[in-house]
Image: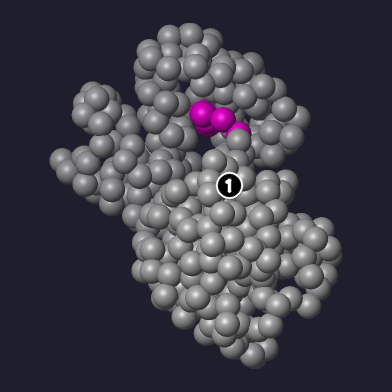
């Protein structure tokens, strides 16, 4: 430790792909204005200026392993982390996902808060036994109550206060500032300026259940405004299958498969409705991004998505294309006053529950963070 260094927090991330770069920013931001400096370490991924800048950390280190190299015991990663920690005043580790928590617990004697972004992380007996071995200094956070409850069910003997929820969140104003207006967004995506458009963003994967989305849109289409379109942003192994389904449903001409769009959240104002049909979404950051754009939501009534949408959007049962269709028809009938009221309700929800400021207050009130609160 150099004389100018104060106490440090280690943030240990599996990688910075997809939403995980912003997750790193979210947790580093929790320590802004405190005496703690944040060192963010990425287990996988090559050095990246974009990732370094996006991490909002005092120090960023890339270990540069690939997914093959961090299988098994991960001894090289443990040694690398020991070298980073040696001689420095680290007080706490926040680890995203199981592998970084595993490495951090074996490489250090730090208290570890493991943040879990998916279901079933402790279904395996080996993981439950590992967690039990380190229970004295391991605490768990789920990104939604649904993920938290899944972990509590797997670890029933753990005190409830050691397995808590801390929602994903956004810098509301910063995100809004990046989102382009409706006309520019439609131009960027190649969408018609005057069409009524349902948007969906996500991998073309069974977990996202775009099959139900296509079926529901096809059923609703005769009652939607003339020229309505479904725009699907994302890529994946189901692309050919989904395109074939659109053809068999007779809606190929009304569906746009736009592929992977960099920084897709910038273009959410292109949509009249945002639809998420996912199967047990752990949270759904895209829902927050649509809310920031003021776009009405319709989503499956399961997983973490329910916690985001309930009370400010429309929910439908998982896999129920008829209910999805009915919801789309209802949303198509909203007048300008109703859309404005919806946007205001979503703005309040963001500020009260899913903003950086709201979640920071929640984090520092958790029993597991009490030892790290400095006067």
Relative horizontal placement of residue 102, taking residue 195 as reference (left or right): left
Relative horizontal placement of residue 333, taking residue 134 as reference (left or right): right
User: Is residue 39 on the magenta stretch?
Assistant: no
User: Is residue 11 on the magenta stretch?
Assistant: yes
Which residue is denoted by mark 1 in the rendering? 240
133 up-or-down from 300: above or below: above
275 up-or-down from 221: above or below: above
The one nearer the camera, 32 or 135, is 135
Label 1 Cα neighbours within 10 Å, binned few <14 / some 14-19 / many ≥20:
few
The one nearer the camera, 151 or 119, is 119
The residue located at (65%, 37%) in the rendering is: 55
The one nearer the camera, 239 or 345, is 239
149 up-or-down from 309: above or below: above
Q: State the quadrant of the N terminus.
A: top right
Relative horizontal placement of residue 285, taking residue 165 as reference (left or right): right
Residue 35 placement (x, y as % from top left):
58, 37
Tell me which secondary structure the magenta stretch mostly adopts. strand
Relative horizontal placement of residue 12, taking residue 344 as reference (left or right): left
295 up-or-down from 204: above or below: below
Regarding residue 92, the answer to whether it shows in the image is: no
Tell me which segment is drawn in magenta. 7-16
Q: Quadrant of residue 332?
A: bottom right
The residue located at (50%, 24%) in the rendering is: 90
Residue 126 placement (x, y as % from top left):
24, 25
Residue 83 placement (x, y as % from top left):
53, 10
Residue 71 placement (x, y as % from top left):
43, 17
């Amino acid at each position: 430790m150099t004389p100018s260094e104060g106490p440090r927090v280690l943030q240990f991330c599996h990688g910075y792909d997809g939403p995980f770069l912003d997750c790193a920013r979210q947790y580093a931001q929790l320590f802004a204005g405190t005496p703690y400096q944040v060192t963010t370490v990425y287990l996988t991924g090559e050095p990246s200026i974009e990732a370094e800048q996006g991490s909002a950390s005092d120090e960023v280190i890339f270990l540069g392993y690939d997914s093959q190299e961090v299988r098994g015991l991960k001894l090289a990663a443990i040694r690398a982390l020991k070298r980073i920690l040696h001689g420095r005043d680290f007080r706490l580790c926040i680890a995203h996902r199981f592998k970084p928590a595993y490495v951090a617990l074996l490489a250090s004697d730090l208290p570890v808060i493991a943040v879990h972004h998916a279901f079933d992380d402790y279904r395996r007996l080996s993981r439950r036994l590992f967690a039990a071995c380190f229970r004295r200094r391991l605490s768990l956070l789920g990104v939604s109550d649904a993920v938290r409850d899944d972990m509590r069910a797997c670890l029933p003997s753990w005190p409830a206060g050691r397995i808590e929820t801390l929602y994903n969140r956004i810098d509301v104003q910063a995100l809004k500032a990046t989102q382009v207006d409706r006309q520019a967004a439609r131009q960027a995506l190649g969408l018609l300026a005057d069409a009524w458009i349902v948007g969906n963003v996500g991998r073309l994967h069974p977990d996202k259940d775009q099959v139900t989305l296509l079926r529901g849109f096809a059923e609703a289409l005769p009652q939607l405004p003339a020229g309505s379109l479904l725009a699907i942003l994302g890529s994946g192994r189901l692309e050919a299958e989904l395109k074939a389904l659109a053809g068999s449903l007779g809606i190929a001409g009304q569906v746009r498969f736009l592929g992977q769009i960099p920084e897709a959240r910038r273009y959410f104002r292109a949509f009249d409705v945002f639809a998420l049909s996912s199967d047990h979404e752990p949270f759904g950051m895209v829902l927050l991004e649509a809310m920031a754009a003021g776009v009405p939501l319709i989503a499956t009534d399961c997983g973490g998505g329910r916690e985001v949408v309930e009370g400010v959007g429309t929910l439908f049962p998982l896999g129920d294309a008829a209910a999805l269709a009915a919801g789309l028809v209802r949303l198509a009938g909203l007048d300008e006053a109703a859309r404005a009221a919806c946007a205001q309700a979503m703005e309040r929800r963001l500020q009260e529950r899913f903003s950086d400021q709201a979640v920071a207050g929640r984090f520092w009130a958790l029993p597991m963070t009490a030892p790290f609160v400095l006067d």
